[in-house]
Amino acid sequence: MSWDPTGFAPKHFLWDLKDRVATITLNRPERKNPLTFDSYDELRDTFRALNQTRLAKAVVIQGAGGNFCSGGDVHEIIGPLTKMDSAGLLKFTRMAGDLVRAMRACPQPIVAAVEGVCAGAGAIIAMASDLRIAKAGATTAFLFTRVGLSGADMGACAILPRLIGHGRAAELLFTARTMTTDEGFAWGFYNRVVDNAQVEARALAEQLASGPSIAHCITKRQLDAEWNVTIEEAIEMEARAQAYCMETKDFRRAYEAFASKQTPEFKGD
């Protein structure tokens, strides 16, 4: 583990590390926090780097100014894309997909705090997080068909149906209509709908950060790995994963704390 997040100073978003929770704040509030080529790139690299530190145990991603993220910047991304050749377009779409790969490969649980507008690539970032907390009234839309693109963007056709079901995902991806917070909660996209998403997301992340980080990493990894295996294969995969967890010091600490009627203090080893 070689990356020190305490000295990290990103150029394209805000960063905070406190009580083992890393907070990423998309910070272009005047335009509802759209992404640029550079912010895509830096976000991807940041999630990759989180695989190399023990100092961050959970991640919150949120937006400044009452909105989450309005997607790719119309003038800084969509306009230039119309002028690119085939090689340039494929380079961009692969880079965007790499952000989702990095989020899913990042060992820490990621909690998205969704407020206001959550659209396009912003909806994808929320989708790619492990848990989603929404402020009442937030609106989520996968807008790709509105600009003549398919709903097959950054893994949406694979991940979204697993969250909300095939038919509901198909409707959102074909029509680009807005999903309300009530729908998102009823369908399983949002874990909670609350009055203050950022406060609730922070509290949940702190709870996760105080837990067994090796075990959380394995849970996250297996949730993805078991999408396309048989039940028999999944049971064997989980047997091996759980046996590994039983070799950790955190497992022994939990037993000793239980035996002495105390709360375990997990240390991630």
Image (cartoon, grey):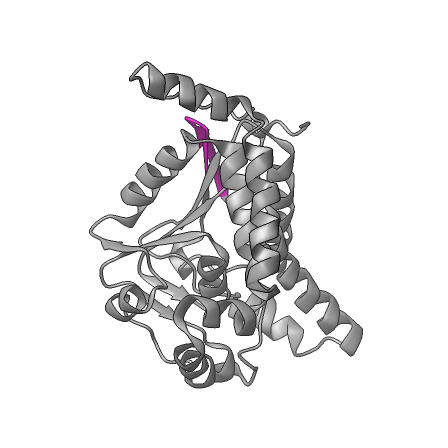
- Farthest residue to the left: give it: 195
Residue at position x 34%, y 75% from top?
178
- Farthest residue to the right: give it: 87
Question: Residue 101 appears at what percent x and percent y?
Answer: 62, 56
Residue at position x 50%, y 58% from top?
128
Write down the quadrant of residue 207 in the picture: top left
For the N terminus, the image quarter is top right
Q: In the picture provided, is 183 more to the left or to the right than 81?
A: left
Q: In the picture provided, is 41 more to the left or to the right than 157?
A: right
Write down the quadrant of residue 175 in the picture: bottom left
In depth, the one of 118 and 156 nearer the eye is: 156
Residue at position x 40%, y 36% from top?
208
Q: Is residue 10 above or below residue 38?
A: above
Question: Residue 269 appears at what percent x and percent y?
Answer: 56, 24
Q: Can residue 67 be seen in this view?
A: yes
Q: Is residue 107 visible?
A: no
The segment highlighted magenta reads 14-22
Question: Residue 95 appears at what percent x and percent y?
Answer: 68, 61
Q: In the picture provided, is 181 more to the left or to the right than 127?
A: left
Q: Is residue 180 above or below residue 67?
A: below
Q: Is residue 134 above or below residue 19?
A: below
Question: Residue 119 appears at what percent x and percent y?
Answer: 42, 68
Q: Does the magenta stretch include residue 106?
A: no
In depth, the one of 219 and 125 nearer the eye is: 219
Residue at position x 55%, y 42% from top?
218
Magenta: main secondary structure? strand
- Farthest residue to the front: give it: 232
Q: In the picture provided, is 233 more to the left or to the right than 33?
A: right
Write down the quadrant of residue 66 in the picture: bottom left
In depth, the one of 211 and 86 nearer the eye is: 211
Q: Is residue 45 above or below residue 3?
A: below
